[in-house]
Image (spheres, rainbow, N blue to C red):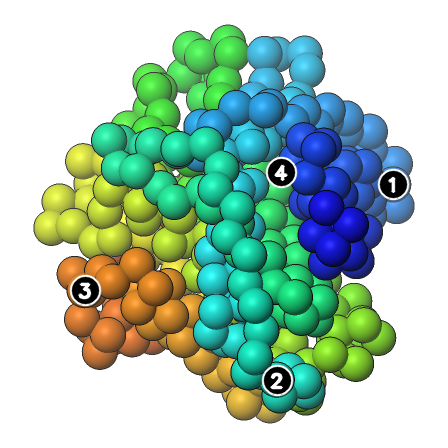
Amino acid sequence: MDYYNSLIGHTPFSFFRSINKPIVIFNYYENYVAKLLNDLCTARGIDFECSVEYFQDSSVEAMCSCNGKENKLIIFEGALLSIYRFASILSCVYRTVAMKNESSCAKHLNFQGNTITSNGIEIDSSIIISDIIEENIVTDYIAMVALKIIIAHEIGHLLSGHIQYRQQHGENSVAFSMASTNSNVDNEILQVMEIDADQFSACHIMTDLENDLIKDEKLNSILLDQKQIYRLVGSAIQCVFYLIGIKNDFWKTDTPYKYTHPPACTRVNLFLDIMRLQMGKEREKDWAQIANGVIVAQKNIYAYYGTDYQDPLQFVIDIMGKDEYGNWLLDKWRKLKPKFAELSQLPFV
């Protein structure tokens, strides 16, 4: 027990403290939400409150809601377990992000959690812990960035006029979730809201990357070089969208307009496009490391599970090439964004 406990809890955002204690979000993520809102609102003299709740539930879910009075963000334990599982595979099994420690003799402890199912698909929830502490720390960082991507996405829904738009269409209590959404508005508009929230998340993660991660002393002391920090962010992005692809049971589809969420491949494509735009042509090599992190993470997760339904070359084309459906959604977004901004409590978003 003492040996196990010595391997975990080395970051303030570690999901684990002791084998006898439940997995929790900790105040770190509540403070993250508070800081995100404070940074956006305080300078403009705008108040916006949002409570953060954690459900010890095996559902693979994250959601935000508004009942007309209270804004709420909810993270389910099943989503945390799934994200952490993927991160631990990428760090402990494959070393997707290169570290200075070259040891190849790690012992990996596999802890089986409760069975998680989504759309009838069983999702492996066992957690890998390495006796090389640095591998566990990198796992924490990948999972932390992935969770921030999810949280920032949900906050994006709350801030960007999506709630008010749906309320105008007769919905008093509004919720957005990782699963399909019951709504009075058309699916294509719901999908536009999803990519709008993704864009908010991508921009905010870029801010975190440039202001915090790239300067993080612990990361810089563990990773081989700073290129690996960009690769780590790419790995986190793919952890999120791989999970979304499983949850909604499609990566891409011939009839995407039938769903309330865009295909996962379209979302990754547009997410990377926003980051590329933010970084500019002079940072193309750094952006390429992020994209490479997505690609290598995909390769390693698929290799671990022995799945082969996605051609590796096609995956690269999907996320790097022209996405016709994504461009169609962007056209819709350009027309709807002024309306969202008009309705939002924060029109600058």
Going by the numbered disc 3, the residue's amino acid type is Asp
Give the residue displayed 34% in from the left and 32% down from the top. Answer: 117
Going by the numbered disc 1, the residue's amino acid type is Thr
Q: Residues within 10 Å of mark 3 (few under 14, many from 20)?
A: few
Q: Is residue 336 above or below residue 328?
A: above
Q: Which residue was labeled with disc 2?
A: 103
Q: Which residue was labeled with disc 3?
A: 308
Q: Which mark is residue 219?
A: none
Q: Which residue was labeled with disc 4?
A: 155
In front: mark 1 or mark 2?
2
Q: Is residue 284 above or below residue 58?
A: below
Cα separation, mark 2 vs mark 3, equals 29 Å
Q: Position of residue 335 (x, y in %)?
A: 39, 46
**Comes first in the chain, label 1 or label 4:** 1
**Comes first in the chain, label 1 or label 3:** 1
At mark 1, the secondary structure is helix
Q: Residues within 10 Å of mark 2 (few under 14, many from 20)?
A: few
**Comes first in the chain, label 2 or label 3:** 2
Q: Quadrant of residue 219?
A: bottom right
Give the residue displayed 68% in from the left and 45% down from the top. Answer: 15
Q: Which mark is residue 42?
A: 1
Going by the numbered disc 4, the residue's amino acid type is Ile
In front: mark 1 or mark 3?
3
**Comes first in the chain, label 3 or label 4:** 4
Cα separation, mark 1 vs mark 2, equals 47 Å
Q: Residues within 10 Å of mark 1 (few under 14, many from 20)?
A: few
